[in-house]
Amino acid sequence: MSDIDATVLDRLFATVQSRKGADPESSYTAKLFTKGRAKIAQKVGEEAVESVIEAMRDDRDALASESADLLYHLLVLWADAGLKPDEVWAKLDARVGTSGIAEKASRPKD
Ligand SMILES: N=c1c2ncn([C@@H]3O[C@H](COP(=O)(O)OP(=O)(O)OP(=O)(O)O)[C@@H](O)[C@H]3O)c2ncn1[C@@H]1O[C@H](COP(=O)(O)O)[C@@H](O)[C@H]1O
């Protein structure tokens, strides 16, 4: 488990990108792209709700599965919108900061 880390998101994103224009009959991702952004966004919303439900049921394994579904669909949404993961990582990195003060100063207000 220790050699698995968040770089899996970059690798999955590359695979997702490669499915643009692929055969929708053989790829769920390609099929999602043909259905369009509204459908992809709807799937992100559904998977977010399912993740919340599993968290509230205190089912850690189901929460992990639904979270994986959520992240996958979010990557498809980014790809459809032309957003690169690096742009999101940069936002997160700026928020982490190098100290508590930097973290507080750079975090957007709720
Ligand atoms: N990581 C995923 C992944 N996570 C979830 N899913 C699919 O997301 C769907 C979610 O299930 P749902 O029941 O909510 O949806 P559904 O009823 O199948 O579909 P809808 O009619 O609701 O759209 C399932 O069909 C899952 O197979 C994924 N499909 C593909 N990938 C990866 O994406 C890459 C490209 O795969 P292909 O899409 O097969 O080319 C590969 O690395 C795959 O492992």
Image (cartoon, rainbow, N blue to C red):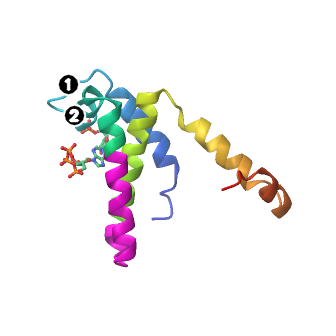
Q: Give the image location of residue 30, x and y in percent.
A: 26, 30
Q: Nearer the viewer, residue 52 or 68?
A: 52
Main SS class of the magenta portion in the image: helix
Magenta-colored stretch includes residue 90:
no
Please give the name of the residue rendered at 20% of the width and 24% of the height, measured from the top-left corner: 23
According to the picture, the residue beneath numbered tag 2 turns out to be: 27
Q: How many marks?
A: 2
Q: Which residue is mark 1?
A: 23
Q: Residue at x 82, y 54 (%)?
A: 105
Indicate the secondary structure of the residue bearing disc 2: loop
**For this rendering, which residue is in front, 95 or 9?**
95
Looking at the rendering, which quadrant does residue 28 occupy? Answer: top left
Kind of residue sitting beneath label 2:
Ser
Relative to residue 101, is residue 3 drawn left or right? left
In which quadrant of the rendered image does the N terminus lie?
A: bottom left
Percent from the top left, x then y, of residue 53?
Answer: 34, 68
Q: Residue 85 in the image: x percent, y percent?
A: 54, 38
Q: Is mark 2 within 8 Å of ligand 1?
A: yes
User: Which residue is painted at 43% across and 40% down in the image?
Assistant: 75
Q: Quadrant of residue 12?
A: top left
Residue 10 is labelled as none
Marks 1 and 2 close (CB-CB < 8 Å): yes
Q: Position of residue 26 (x, y in %)?
A: 16, 32
Specify start and end residues of the magenta stretch as a single range.
43-62
Q: Nearer the viewer, residue 52 or 90?
A: 52
Q: CA distance from mark 1 to mark 2?
A: 6 Å
Displayed-image quarter of ligand 1: top left
Q: Is residue 36 above or below residue 57?
A: above
Residue flagged by tag 1: what amino acid is it? Asp
* Residue 49 versus residue 77 in the image, above or below: below
Q: Residues within 10 Å of mark 2 (few under 14, many from 20)?
A: few
Quadrant in which the C terminus is drawn? bottom right
